[in-house]
Image: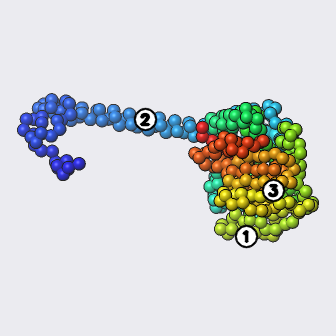
Amino acid sequence: MSAADDQPTTARADGGRPADGGVRDVPGEELARGRFARAWKRFHLVPLGILMAAVVAATCTGYVVREQQREQAMRPPQEAVGVESSLPGQCLSPNHPFPTANPWSNDARPSSEQAFQLGLSTGDQTVVEGKDGWVFWGDVQANNLSQSVGRRVLSQQEMTQWASHYAALAERLRAQGVDFVIQVVPAKWDVYPEQLPDWAQELRGPTTLDYLRYSHPELPVMDMRDALVAAKATAPVYQPLNSHWTPYGGTVGWTAFAACVGAMNPKYAVLRPLDVIGTTLDQGNNEFASFGRLPDGDRSASPVWGTPPGPMTITDKTGKARQVTTDYGTDVLELPAVTRNESAQSDLSALILRDSQGNALAPGWQQGFATTIQVAGALDHPETPVDVQSYVDEHHPDIVVLEVTERFLNFVPIG
């Protein structure tokens, strides 16, 4: 814009065009002279009024559409209770049927939302105090708290997109003779729901894992909740100040996995539980220390091995190979990593797309499979998906395992 553009309009010499040759008046203004001038001053505002009315109408319409979309996003998908799963019973949790009550459906939702907000208002919304010293992440972590009670589940559209993505992956792998299983690591609120705060208890409804199991039984989604709930009577499978399962919980997860895939395909029947003869207790890792939560005794459990774990070779993302034992908790920060175990339970190989819950599962994978290719699954970054096919082409695994922590079911894959 020039300096002249900031100046007042020059006087007109011809009644229509500025004397300096500037822009002509809008159509109709040239006729607004004499006795029509006053009327035109009123009339010429009509188009502006119409435009403003249109803008307001569009804004209101947009708001209504956004609210409808928001409501649809929060509305649970259609329930499909009682449909038989494509997986054998060893992969499921019969003691976790689809919940009969849903405080987040239809007319019940407004009062549940009010109770939810009231409960949150009593403390820090980043972390939520449960019972007996248990602490849970709030919604800052993948809508964790909302997922725990079923306030946040995948919408029908999101559920369809999620299911279609992994059904297509399963079909592509099947065509190449590669098995596929989705190993969902239950959140601690799904294994220790009694430790949620009192105000959250009556708000618990179906979760995304429930909907995936019962709305899309064609998907190979493992449900290990029964195994972990049973094992917690022996030793802690989760701890109060961490959202990850304990090392002992990881061995329970491996046992459930081995039973599942062994029932899926006889060639995996050689996989068996690890030789755990007891547990030791310690404080474990504290995710909530920065929030002022101090550990209260030894409330994490690690396995005691009956037979000392054998040697294996690991090559981590640096490309450097080193010798460790098979109980090494390969960390997600080391991925991609390849492990080789000459004394494994099988001569099979597994491509494992995983997150940090895989740290505790790693000893099972590494003792069960002669070769594991462990890759960060990146489900919480759906915009940068893993190129599964390139890993399959390079390593030719017998099975692809998608290990995913339950709260990461919040994320919908792209494409």
| Residue that numbered label 3 is attached to | 363
Residue 294: numbered disc: 1
| Residue that numbered label 2 is attached to | 58
Residue 208: numbered disc: none
**Quarter of the image where the C terminus is located:** top right
Q: Which residue type carries mark 3?
A: Pro
Q: Which residue type carries mark 2?
A: Ala
Find out whether the residues at labels 2 and 1 contact each other: C-beta distance under 8 Å.
no
Find out whether the residues at labels 1 and 3 contact each other: C-beta distance under 8 Å.
no
Lower position in the chain sequence, tag 2 or tag 1: 2
* Label 1 crowd bin: few (<14), some (14–19), many (20+), radius 10 Å: few
Lower position in the chain sequence, tag 1 or tag 3: 1
Res. 45 image quadrant: top left
Find out whether the residues at labels 2 and 3 contact each other: C-beta distance under 8 Å.
no
Secondary element at image label 1: loop
| Scheme of image coloration | rainbow
